[in-house]
Amino acid sequence: MGDAAASLAVTKLDFDTGQPLTNQVVRSGKIKVQVSYQPIDLNERVDDNYDINNVSYQIFYNGQIYQQNSGYSAFGTGYVELRDLDNNGIDEIIVSTYSGGAHCCTSLVIYTWQKDKFIREETGFLDGSGGSFEDLDGDNNYEFVTVDNAFLYAFSSYAASFPPSRIYTFQQGKLADVTRKYPQELRKTLAAMLKAFQLAKKEKAEVNGILAGYVAQKILLGEYEEAWQFLLANYDKNSDWGLDIYGESTAIGKYPDFPAALSAFLLKNGYLTPVQVK
């Protein structure tokens, strides 16, 4: 391919709600992805179509096919994109699909070429749009910026939850958690959390879901003690959201209050060690 043709090559294909794709191509260097997509009939319930694989793609390297996969994506919110995430001169292939349903779920699959094959990595199901690839420190390596989905609905409604940050680097075909290496980014989210808390407090709305994320975010910054005192002074003592203790699938007890429930939750999810638990 000549320089002019290469510069015109499409490197991203979005799934459109009403427009099917048939063997559409994205390419970069020796990598080519051939994509087909069939929109779901929006007059039918999404649940009725849930097991339909309406996205299919074939991955080529140097003209040879290496991967052939299919999946499901609702509402035309997915995409296939080529982007060099790890600054090694070879683009990764990012396939984003959306499951449909309330507040859920985006899944990203990343393929990277290593030696003589493609390595596959997955984010798992993530809330909303899933996250974004951003070069946070200007080194031409992209970080994947998202949130800890475990906090959604844990101590409040979805709308009143404010999950803490999760930041991953992508190296050697794998996503690795590097959240604590980006304190400036964490503080931006922390400021937004504090603003959301102040507004909720003023409007007498739910605060515990915000405070849960706030404490976790402060832990990531090494400021647990300060955050805990703030929590004790400001949490809603009347809310019982998230206080149930579950066995296999049913409630087997109840925490005495929100701080006790949050401590157990933070321990379970790796934010605290047993020694730190209040």
Image (cartoon, rainbow, N blue to C red):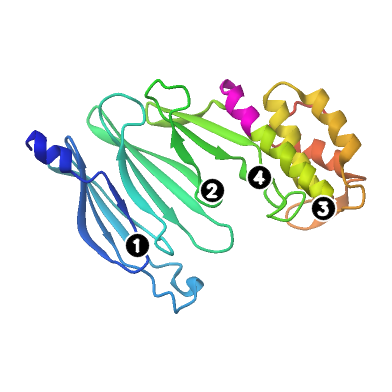
Three-letter code for the amino acid on which mark 3 is drawn: Glu
Three-letter code for the amino acid on which mark 2 is drawn: Leu
Q: Is residue 242 left or right of residue 135?
A: right
Magenta range is 180-188
In which quadrant of the rendered view does residue 157 lie? bottom right
Name which residue lies at 32% across and 44% down.
Answer: 81
Q: Which residue is mark 2?
A: 126
Which of discs 3 and 4 lies nearer the camera? The answer is 3
Q: Position of residue 21 (x, y in %)?
A: 25, 62
Residue 32 seen by the camera: no
Q: Earlier in the sequence, mark 2 or mark 3?
A: 2
How many angstroms separate mark 2 from mark 4 (CA)?
Answer: 10 Å
Three-letter code for the amino acid on which mark 4 is drawn: Ala
Tell me the number on the disc at residue 150.
Answer: 4
Tell me the number on the disc at residue 16.
Answer: 1
How many angstroms separate mark 3 from mark 1 (CA)?
Answer: 39 Å
Q: Which residue is mark 3?
A: 203
70 up-or-down from 82: above or below: below
Nearer to me, 125 or 102:
102
Name which residue lies at 85% across and 35% down.
Answer: 231
Nearer to me, 57 or 142:
142
Which of discs 3 and 1 lies nearer the camera? The answer is 3
- Residue contact at pointers 2 and 3, CB within 8 angstroms: no
Q: Position of residue 240 (x, y in %)?
A: 87, 53
